[in-house]
């Protein structure tokens, strides 16, 4: 029901914007469409990859590796994968939801998403260039440790 309310509110605000300034509203809609076109291939690619992964790894395997019963070993595994992987947030959150539906644990997905967003093993060379080695390693290390705190808090709140 709340989705219908949000869609209705969005349509109403779009109508207000269009009535106020048609030219700016059209320009904004064209920018939004271009952004959608740029994001779509990446989004579909990762969702397809997750679909293949879920087809190859049945829910029992996902539960064993990343489920609530995997405990801190699963959290560490999820954190390492998240730190190494380079996936944008708009893809990561739906992917985490799919993994949760297939048996992954909240604590493990908390660590995965945290490290995915905050730790950048793949992007370290760029960070070295702009921030220097010492600061980059320090920042990534703190972010990695912080992801375990996030996982712990999520476990206490949700679990």
Image: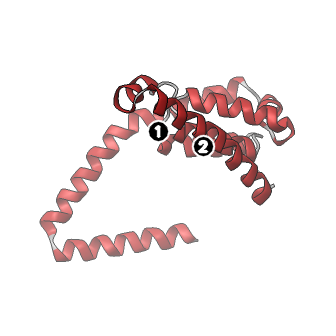
Check residue 44 in the rendering and tell me which mark sits there, or answer none. Answer: none
Depicted 50 relative to depicted 13: above or below: above
Sequence-first tag of 1 and 2: 1
Label 2: which residue? Answer: 114
Query: In terms of secondary structure, where does tag 1 sit?
Result: loop
Q: Left or right: 26 with respect to 64? A: left
The part of the image, by quadrant, that contains residue 72 is: top right
Q: Left or right: 57 with respect to 43? A: right
Q: Position of residue 59 (x, y in %)?
A: 78, 34
State the residue at coordinates (87%, 39%).
69
State the residue at coordinates (52%, 37%).
139
The part of the image, by quadrant, that contains residue 11 is: bottom left
Label 1: which residue? Answer: 88
Q: Position of residue 103 (x, y in %)?
A: 77, 40
Image marks 1 and 2: residues in contact by CB distance under 8 Å: no
Q: Left or right: 125 with respect to 64? A: left
- Spot the residue most to the left: 23
In this rendering, does residue 59 appear at all? no
């Amino acid at each position: 029901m709340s989705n219908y309310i949000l869609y209705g509110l969005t349509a109403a605000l779009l109508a207000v914007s269009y009535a106020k300034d048609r030219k700016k509203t059209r320009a904004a809609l064209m920018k939004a469409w271009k952004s959608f076109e740029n994001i779509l291939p990446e989004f579909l690619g990762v969702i397809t990859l997750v679909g293949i992964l879920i087809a190859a790894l049945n829910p029992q395997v996902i539960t064993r590796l990343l489920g609530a019963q995997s405990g801190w070993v699963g959290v560490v595994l999820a954190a390492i994968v998240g730190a190494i992987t380079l996936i944008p947030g708009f893809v990561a959150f739906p992917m985490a939801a799919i993994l949760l539906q297939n048996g992954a644990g909240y604590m493990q997905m908390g660590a995965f998403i945290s490290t995915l967003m905050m730790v950048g093993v793949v992007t370290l060379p760029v960070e070295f260039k702009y921030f220097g080695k010492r600061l980059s390693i320090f920042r990534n290390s703190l972010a990695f440790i912080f992801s375990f705190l996030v996982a712990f808090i999520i476990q206490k709140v949700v679990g």
